[in-house]
């Protein structure tokens, strides 16, 4: 039997489901849900996973799926419990189990992805040109060129349009359609991140417990202008610790936080900041509009030997779909699918291939 899949609603008869386009927010409000609950409970809870703080366009079809994976109400069916010094049934919600070994696993993934290939880092691609003989000429920022048989774009939609100037009006229309989180909140929310080791950003009464065992610390406040601020602290000391930290027990790990949208009056000690990040064009919205753009991609996918993968080419902004879109494009140009032994994973591979038009 098939296991539940994020792809089902967009394949086969699922395409006819109107809930693919109707926002969950609209149904929630129609049923009497309050704006305050949506802004103070729903959005902060799921922002921590989706890295998007505008969830009103979220298609209703995803509602049951996210409750199963990132439950607002954890039960024995959608969460795991473990014994601890706190209780015999200390609940550990499933949302971050895939991140348990991520500090180690992410490095392994990239090592395998780049094994035995000519990897060129810190090189911006300026243009991809289709030659009369069918070859593709790649121009980089240093005026170097290389002729290849096929090209796979694994970048934001707008970058494709900037690089592939010969794509045509239809492809250009599709590339300019996806909406990203920073189109809504370019100066706030999850747009800007600070990587640091200042635990004082977490309220003192919760600090010790959160630093040892919480994957996220979320604080919701009302700003002077009446809007809602969602502060999110990602606790990478628990989630994705690096070399020298990965093997340590939780109570021995150092403070490793990534802060977004600090509440008013808060600050981070400058000497404890190790870096910053900008998430521009990193997170497409979950929306019916973006789903339509994704389904339209089949009209240009593979034309002239040019393929497209990334989070915007899938039904949702998540890691497994984005990664699988790359596998689908690699398979289309001759690579072997690497997980033949996993039947359920292979079903999703074929489902996404159908969605992407490959």
Image: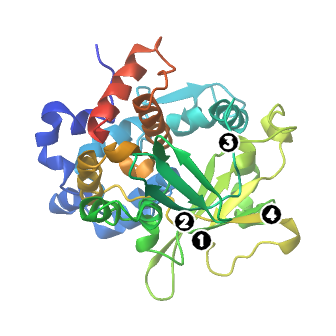
In contact (CB < 8 Å): disc 2 and disc 1: yes
Q: Position of residue 22 (x, y in %)?
A: 18, 55
How far apart are the alpha carbons under marks 3 and 4?
A: 17 Å
| Image-quadrant location for residue 30 | bottom left
Which SS class for mark 1?
loop
- What percent of the width, then of the height, locates residue 238? 71, 42
Q: Secondary structure at mark 4?
A: loop
Task: Determine which residue is flagged by label 4.
Answer: 198
Secondary structure of the residue carrying tag 3 is helix
Say which label, 4 or 2, has the lower sequence index. Answer: 2
Closer to the camera in the image, 201 or 357: 357
Q: How far apart, in angstroms, are the residues tagged by discs 2 and 3?
A: 18 Å
**Res. 50 visible in picture:** yes
Where residue 3 sits: x, y (%)? 33, 21
- N-term-proximal mark, 3 vs 4: 4
Which residue has dot 2 on it? Answer: 190
Classify residue 352 as left or right of residue 157.
left
Callout 2 crowding tier (Cα within 10 Å): few <14, some 14–19, many ≥20: many
Per the model, the C-alpha gap separating discs 1 and 3 is 20 Å
The reply to whether residue 314 is in sight is no
Pointer 2 or 3: first along the chain: 2
How far apart in space, not on screen, are marks 2 and 1 (Cα)?
7 Å
Q: Which mark is residue 239?
A: 3
* Residue appearing at x 26%, y 45% in the figure: 298
Classed neighbour count for the residue bearing mark 3: other residues with Cα under 10 Å, few (<14), some (14–19), many (≥20) = many
Residue under the point 16% across and 57% down: 31
The residue that mark 1 highlights is: 261
Where disc 2 sits, the SS reads loop
Q: Is residue 6 above or below residue 295?
A: above
Instruction: Please tell me which of labels 2 and 1 falls first in the chain.
Output: 2
Crowding at dot 1, Cα within 10 Å, few <14 / some 14-19 / many 20+, comes out as many
Q: Closer to us: mark 2 or mark 1?
A: 2
């Amino acid at each position: 039997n098939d296991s539940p899949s994020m792809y089902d609603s967009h394949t086969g008869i699922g395409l006819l489901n109107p809930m693919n386009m109707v926002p969950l927010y609209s149904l929630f409000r129609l049923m009497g849900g309050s704006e305050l609950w949506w802004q103070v409970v729903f959005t902060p809870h799921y922002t921590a996973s989706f890295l998007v703080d505008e969830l009103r366009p979220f298609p209703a079809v995803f509602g049951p799926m996210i409750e199963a994976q990132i439950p607002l109400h954890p039960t024995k069916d959608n969460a795991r419990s473990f014994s601890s010094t706190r209780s015999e049934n200390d609940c550990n919600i499933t949302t971050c189990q895939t991140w348990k070994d991520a500090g180690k696993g992410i490095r392994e993934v990239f090592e395998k992805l780049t094994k035995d290939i000519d990897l060129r880092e810190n090189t911006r691609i300026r243009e991809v040109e289709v030659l009369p003989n069918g070859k593709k000429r790649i121009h980089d920022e240093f005026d170097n060129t290389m002729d290849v048989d096929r090209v796979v774009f694994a970048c934001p939609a707008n970058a494709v349009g900037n690089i592939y100037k010969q794509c045509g009006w239809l492809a250009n229309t599709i590339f300019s359609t996806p909406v990203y989180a920073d189109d809504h909140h370019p100066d706030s929310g999850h747009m800007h991140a600070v990587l640091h080791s200042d635990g004082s950003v977490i309220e003192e009464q919760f600090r010790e417990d959160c630093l040892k065992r919480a994957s996220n610390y979320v604080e919701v406040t009302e700003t002077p202008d009446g809007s809602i601020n969602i502060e999110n602290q990602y606790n990478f000391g628990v989630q994705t610790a690096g070399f020298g930290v990965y093997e340590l027990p939780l109570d021995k790990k150092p403070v490793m936080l990534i802060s977004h949208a600090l509440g008013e009056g808060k600050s981070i000690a400058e000497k404890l900041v190790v870096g910053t990040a900008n998430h521009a064009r990193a997170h497409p919205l979950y929306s019916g509009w973006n789903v339509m753009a994704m389904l339209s991609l089949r009209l240009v996918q593979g034309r002239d030997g040019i393929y497209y993968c990334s989070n915007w080419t899938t039904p949702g902004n998540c890691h497994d779909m984005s990664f699988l879109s790359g596998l689908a494009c690699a398979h289309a140009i001759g690579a072997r699918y690497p997980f033949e032994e996993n039947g359920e994973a292979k079903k999703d591979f074929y489902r996404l291939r159908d969605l992407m038009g490959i």
